Image: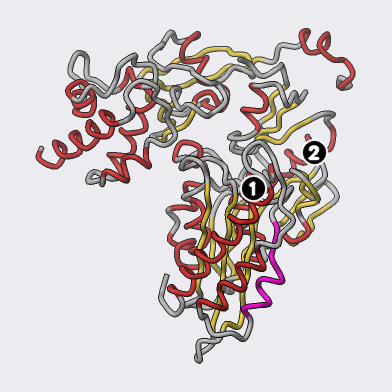
Amino acid sequence: MKPSPFIYHDPRTLSDALSLLGGLDNAKVLAGGQSLMPMMNMRYAMPDHLVDLNRVEGLVGVTHSEGRLHVGSMTKQRDLEVSADVAAAFPLLREALRHVGHRQTRNRGTIGGSLCHLDPAAELPAVCLAAGADLHVAGTGGERTVAMTDFPLGFMTPAIRPDEIVTGISLPGWPEGHGFAFEEFARRQGDFAIVGVAVLIAADATGAIVRAAIALCGVADRPRRCPTAEAVLIGEQASPRALAAAAAEAGKIDATSDIHASAPYRAHLATVLTERALARAVGRLGRAP
Amino acid sequence: MRAPSDGWAGRLDMTDTRRIAVTVNGNTYERRVETRLTLGDFLRHELRLTGTHLGCEHGVCGACTVLVDGRSARSCLMLAVQAHETTITTVEGLSDGETLTPLQEAFKEKHALQCGFCTPGILMTLSEFLNDNPQPSEAEVREAITGHLCRCTGYQGIVEAALLAAERGRKS
């Protein structure tokens, strides 16, 4: 099994990469290759030009400054999983990464690649959606920032033009002692989720929930926030009843049916997993990560 | 620049090649390869290192796993040109001649293989894993091999072999 012929480019700078993308027809960006390479081997994707970002300088790394976690788009998922900055500033991301493929794919797969591939069942887009992340996008015309909320336009369709590259992701930190959890149901460890959920909560000194973010993957054509479920929690004590009410609200999502699961089953999983994730997040409130 | 409408005729005319230098199991090889050649096919067809097995060729079965600069990766999901100037370890690079590694010995003792198709990939993954985590629990071993399909053993012997190798590693 072989990819169909293409011309391979491995630029060393972002501006060279952007020039290539701006000037070539039917070019594809190669990040970690853990989704694009299978598609090329199966010839679902047949680009005429492949622009490999793996040797581009400046797209890799994690920094933590001014309350935000900044991640280079070409940072390997495995490096994020073992990063002390990620563990300290955004433990939800680390927890979710353990569900992303397998060690062998995380060693190559990148966060930017996962966001731009935008598989509806993928974990990292859901985490970035819950986090209210910003994506930094560069094109030949200049740079712009896209909120993760506005990034998914539809099924595997990110808000990025063919001549643009996501260069980094910025996640606004949550207060110390916030609660977080990622839960998913998949048939086997490492498979794409049938349903997954990312949860972030923060409470005040009285224990009342003051902030909540819930994002689901696998249920619809793209990752979805659950604003009505979040609203149920605000101002409430983290009682089992409040969590169950929020989870029931998350289960009202317009779920899709496919060969893997029916819509009612997915909606049921959304409820069950959201309740579990919220309970675990509540258990972590006030504790250092 | 070719328009996409050139279709197959246009594609077949085009052969994009590169010269690469890759260190595999301590030997440096220089070859001119087609840029679309996967690392797995490069190892097997160009270097004749047929210990690395290719199963599904789309990143699901794990048979083709090798170490790239010490990290496990699926060689069907990497291009040979991407391995330029890297150091690769394949299953042929594990043993010292006829002397097997403790992990390989444990595989033999615990009947951790039957047909042997998945074995090279699993050995590479477990070599990396036991290096990072010399005292794993059974659950950790099971999670470590989730990226590999074995249709013979039911995984039990593989898990036992990994735990045995870890135990011997602690004693030595």
Crowding at dot 2, Cα within 10 Å, few <14 / some 14-19 / many 20+, comes out as: some
Q: Which residue is mark 2?
A: A19
Pinpoint the chain carrying mark 2.
A
Q: Residue at x 85, y 29 (%)?
A: A25
> Looking at the picture, which amino acid does disc 1 mark?
Gly
Q: Quadrant of the C terminus of chain A?
A: bottom left
In this figure, which colouring scheme has been used for the structure? secondary structure
Q: Give residue A114's quadrant in the image.
A: top right
Relative placement, left or right, of A227 versus A108 is right
Q: Nearer the viewer, residue B142 or A105?
A: B142
**As displayed, is residue A118 above or below residue B66?**
below
Pinpoint the chain carrying mark 1.
A
Circle count: 2
> Looking at the picture, which amino acid does disc 2 mark?
Ser
Q: Nearer the viewer, residue A236 or B50?
A: A236
User: Which of the numbered marks, if any, corresponds to residue A112?
Assistant: 1
> Is residue A231 part of the magenta span, yes or no?
yes
**Nearest to N terminus: mark 2 or mark 1:** 2
Q: Which residues are magenta?
A: A224-233
Mark 1: secondary structure: helix
Q: Position of residue B26 (x, y in %)?
A: 34, 21
Q: Residue at x 38, y 14 (%)?
A: B51
> Is residue B1 part of the magenta span, yes or no?
no
Q: Residue at x 57, y 49 (%)?
A: A60
Q: Give residue B167's quadrant in the image.
A: top left
Q: CA distance from mark 2 to mark 1?
A: 19 Å
Q: Position of residue B69 (x, y in %)?
A: 42, 33
